[in-house]
Image (tube, rainbow, N blue to C red):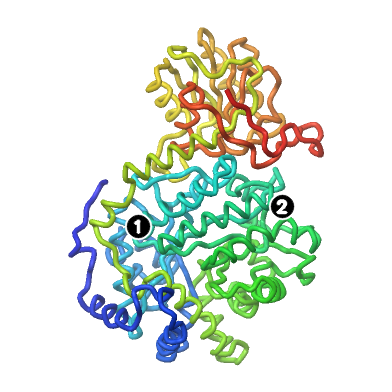
Amino acid sequence: MQHRTSRRSLLTTSAAVAAITALGSQFPAHASDTADFEDTDRRLRAIIARMSVEEKIGQLFVTRVYGHSATAPDQADIDANLRELGVRDAAELIAKYHVGGIIYFTWAHNTRDPHQIAGLSNGIQAAGLAQRVPLPLLIATDQEHGAVCRVGKPATLFPGAMAMGAGGSTGDARTLGRISGAELAAIGIRQDYSPDADVNINPANPVIGVRSFGADPPAVARMVAAEVRGYQDSSVAATAKHFPGHGDTSVDSHTGIPVITHTREQWEQLDAPPFRAAIDAGIDAIMTAHIQFPALDPSNDPATLSRPILTGILREQLGFDGVVITDSLGMQGVRDKYGDDRVPVLALKAGVDQLLDPPKLDVAFNGLLAAVASGELPESRLDESILRILRLKDRRRLFARPYVTARGVDRTVGTRAHLAAAASMAERTTTLLANPQGVLPLARGRHLLITGADPDSPSGTTDPPTTVLAGALSELGFRTTKFPTGTLPSQAQIEAAARAAAGQDAVIVGTYDAGAGGAQSRLVAALIATGVPVIHLALRNPYDIAYLATGYAASLATYCWTDVELRAAARVLAGRVGPRGRLPVAVPRADDPTQDLYPIGHGLSY
C-alpha cells in the first residue's frame, strides 16, 4: 500500500467526533437488532424536524466531487470542483449544499489506494458532522466487479456478474458480496451500486452485457438475491439496478433514450424476477433506469421520472419501501425531454428518494427549492424521502460508526484469504466453448504467442490482457511472446501478428467485442491461415465466437479482462484446473440470430 495514515489523522476534528458521539448515543449500534422501530423512527423524525428546507433538499443529493482529500485536494481537482460545483473541495461542498451522499469515481481521483480512500471518507464524515444539523454521509461507488470497478488493487477484485453467472454458485455470489462489502466498509464506502439485476437477453446491448448475471430470469434472480445478502451481511447497502430492467436495449442510456418493447406480461416473466428477489432478500436500495417502457407507462417519460413505474409498480405492486435512487442525472437518457432544473422535481414526484450526480448541482438544487416554494412539492414529500435515507444510514450503522481506521484497512482490504477466494471463484467461471482439435489442455514448455485486443484494466490498476496472460503462462512453465494488436488492428498489425506466429507451438488470441467482419475477426482468420493452432479467448462478451472464421483450435470465454479472470483462464489452458463454467447466455449464430450457436448451459470439460 502506497501510503499510510494514522488513526489521529483519519479522525480529523474533535468537534466532529463529539457531534457523532452525541448522535450515536441516540441510536443502538444496529437499530434492526431492536424491536423498537417506532422509537428509531421517532428519533429520525426529530432530526428531520430540525432541518431547514435547504438542508432537506441537500440530503436528497448524492454527487461527485474531485480530489483525494476532503480538505486538501490537488490544484487540478480544486479547479475542476470550482468549475463544475462552485466549491473548492468536499468539505465546502457539504457546507454549502448539505448533500446526503458522495459517489466516488476513479476519474475524479477519489480512489488512489485504500488508506487514501479511508482518509477521504473520514474527512467527508467530519464535514457532515460539523454542520448545524450533524449528519453522516452515505458514501457510495460502482463496485460491480468485472467490467465496472472503481476501487482497484490492492483491494480484492472479483469476477464480474456474467462470469459469476457462468459459475452458477449462489454461495460464491454471497461470499463475493460479503468480502467486497467488508473491504468497502473498511475504507468508508457504505453503499454499493451493485448488483446489476438486468436480464441481458439482447446480445447487442451496448451498456449492460457482461454486467448482467445472464439471460435466464430465475438464475439471475438467485444470484442477485445472494449477492444482496452478502453485501448487507457486511453492513453495506446493496443497490439493484436498473429498474424496471435494462437488459433488452440496443441504445446506451448514457447517450440516448432506450425503448423497451416488452409487453407487461413479458416484463413480469423476464425483467421483474431479479427485482422481486432483491426485495425479498431485504435490499436497501433500487436504482432506476433512464429507459422508456410504453407497456408500463405510455407517457414516454423515462422510468426515472415515471410515477406509474416507480410508485405504481415498484412501491405499490412490489411492496418496496426502501430507498429509490436515480441513475446518474448527467446521462442523456433522462435529459432529452426535460431541463436539468425540472428532472429532480419530476423524479421526486415519481417516487425517487436519492438524486444521483446531477450535471449542475446548483441548477438541480434551485429547481427543487423553487418547487417547494411554489407548493408544487410539499415539504412533507421531502420528509418522506429523507426518512427513508436516514433509516438506511442508521441500518448500516453510520450514526454509530461513521469513521474507519487504518488498522481496519490493513486487516481487511486485499488480505491473502480474500484474494484466494476470488481466485478460486474465477476458476469456476472460465467456460470452454469449443475444443475441436483437442489441443487443450496445453503441454507445459510449449512456445506461445499471446496476441489480440489489449484494453486497459477496468479498475485502471492492473495490466492489460496480453501482459497478464503472458506473465501467468510463463509462471506455469510456458515460453511466451506477447504481441498486442488492440481492438482495431490495422492490416499491417494483422500481417505482423501472423508473421510472429511462425515457429510458435500455439497462438492465444484475445478478442474484445469482435463483431461481424471486423478487424479483430480478420486478425483471427489471418492467424488461423498460418497453420499454427489458434486458441481464442473472448475477453468480454462470449458472443465473439459466432463472428470468427472456422478453423480455430479452441475457444474459451472469460467474461472479463481482469487479472483474476485471466489468471484463472491461464490455469485452465495449462490444465492446472478444468474448465467448469457454463454459458449463462445463449450465443446466437451470426448468419441467423434466431438460432443458437451455443445454448444457455453450454460448456465443455476436459
Mark 2 sits on what residue? Answer: 248
Position of residue 509 relative to residue 199, above or below, is: above
Query: Residue drawn at (26%, 76%), measured in percent from left and top?
Result: 16
Q: Residue 19 sits in which quadrant? A: bottom left
Q: Quadrant of the C terminus?
A: top right
Left or right relative to 335: residue 293: right
Q: Residue 525 sits in which quadrant? A: top right
Query: Residue drawn at (59%, 60%), measured in percent from left and top?
Result: 241
Seen from the viewer's position, the closer of residues 226 and 62 is: 226
Left or right relative to 264: residue 13: left
Position of residue 392 relative to residue 45, above or below, is: above
Query: Residue drawn at (46%, 77%), measured in percent from left and top?
Result: 391
Position of residue 289 relative to residue 178, above or below, is: below
Mark 1 sits on what residue? Answer: 76
Query: Residue drawn at (73%, 64%), measured in percent from left and top?
Result: 292
Give residue 167's position: percent from left, percent from top. Answer: 56, 40
Q: Is residue 359 visible?
A: no
Left or right relative to 481: residue 509: right
Work out how far the residue at label 2 is from the one at label 1, CA to CA, in angstroms: 40 Å
Which element is circle 2 on?
loop
Position of residue 486 relative to residue 319, above or below, is: above
Q: Amino acid at mark 1?
A: Ala
- Outermost residue on the top side: it is 503
Which element is circle 1 on?
helix
* Residue 361: image tag: none
Give residue 353's position: percent from left, percent from top. Answer: 55, 75
Seen from the viewer's position, the closer of residues 574 and 192 is: 574
Q: Amino acid at mark 2?
A: Asp
Q: Is residue 389 visible?
A: yes
